[in-house]
Amino acid sequence: MLFITSNEGKFIEAKKIGERYGINIEWKRMEYLEPQGNDLIEIARKSAELLAEKIKEPFFIEDSGLFIEALNGFPGPYSSFVFKTIGNEGIIKLMKGIKNRKAYFIAVIAYFDGKNVHTFIGRVDGEISEKIRGTKGFGYDPVFLYGDKTFAEMGDEKNEVSHRRKALERFFEWYASL
Ligand code: IMP
């Protein structure tokens, strides 16, 4: 099963989750065009459709985002740009003094079966921490609190509960039922 992503952190997690389902995930490290938009599902679907014009064999991609309740869902579909520009320090600053710290991650998998694109979604709820904590994982992991630990403090435990785990689980269960 080919996973196209330029993000090594995503690949490592997906690989470990796949192993639990007996599915071998291979990495095709590649950047691809991601159309902008407000809807992660549409972005993932369109990205997969564009890629399918070049890659003829089955593959999947994954698009994810962090949604902060007090910021009306920001950064959401713009999570990648926001991470590159203001990063975790910027998120902590934006959230300074804000009591409602609820946030969630969404992951959307788009699988191209050689003909059609199928999408699968996963969500995990948590909170934005008061400060950056932990060194494992990637991206927003050091500011995303799940219970009393950030994802960056959890290491592989993250893979039990993450948005990516849930989306992959849905995908693999569907795949196994074909
Ligand atoms: P994209 O899906 O590659 O566009 O990712 C959007 C942004 O969210 C990137 O900056 C990722 O680093 C970040 N991100 C995606 N998944 C996770 C995660 O599991 N933990 C922390 N950050 C994530």
Image: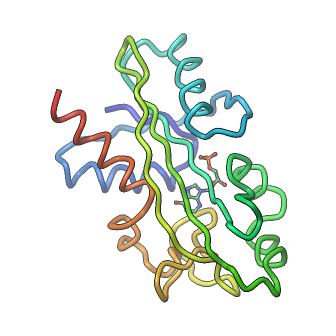
**Can you tell which quarter of the image residue 101 is in?**
bottom right
Q: Residue at x 36, y 74 (%)?
A: 157
User: Compared with residue 4, is residue 16 higher up or lower down, i.e. above or below?
Assistant: below
Q: How many marks?
A: 0
At which x and y percent is residue 60? 42, 32
Q: Quadrant of ligand 1?
A: bottom right
Q: Is residue 61 left or right of residue 59?
A: right
- Which of these two is toward me, 91 or 136? 91
Q: Is residue 110 left or right of residue 157?
A: right
User: Compared with residue 1, is residue 15 higher up or lower down, i.e. above or below?
Assistant: below
At which x and y percent is residue 20? 20, 55
Q: Residue at x 74, y 33 (%)?
A: 36
- Which of these two is toward me, 49 or 38? 38
Q: Residue at x 48, y 78 (%)?
A: 146
- Which of these two is toward me, 140 or 40? 40
At which x and y percent is residue 77? 69, 46
**Can you tell which quarter of the image residue 63 is in?**
top right
Q: Is residue 170 left or right of residue 32?
A: left
Q: Residue at x 37, y 16 (%)?
A: 57
Q: Quadrant of the C terminus?
A: top left
Colouring mode (rainbow / by chain / secondary structure / one colour): rainbow
Q: Quadrant of the N terminus?
A: top left
User: Compared with residue 130, is residue 154 higher up or lower down, i.e. above or below?
Assistant: above
At which x and y percent is residue 31? 63, 33
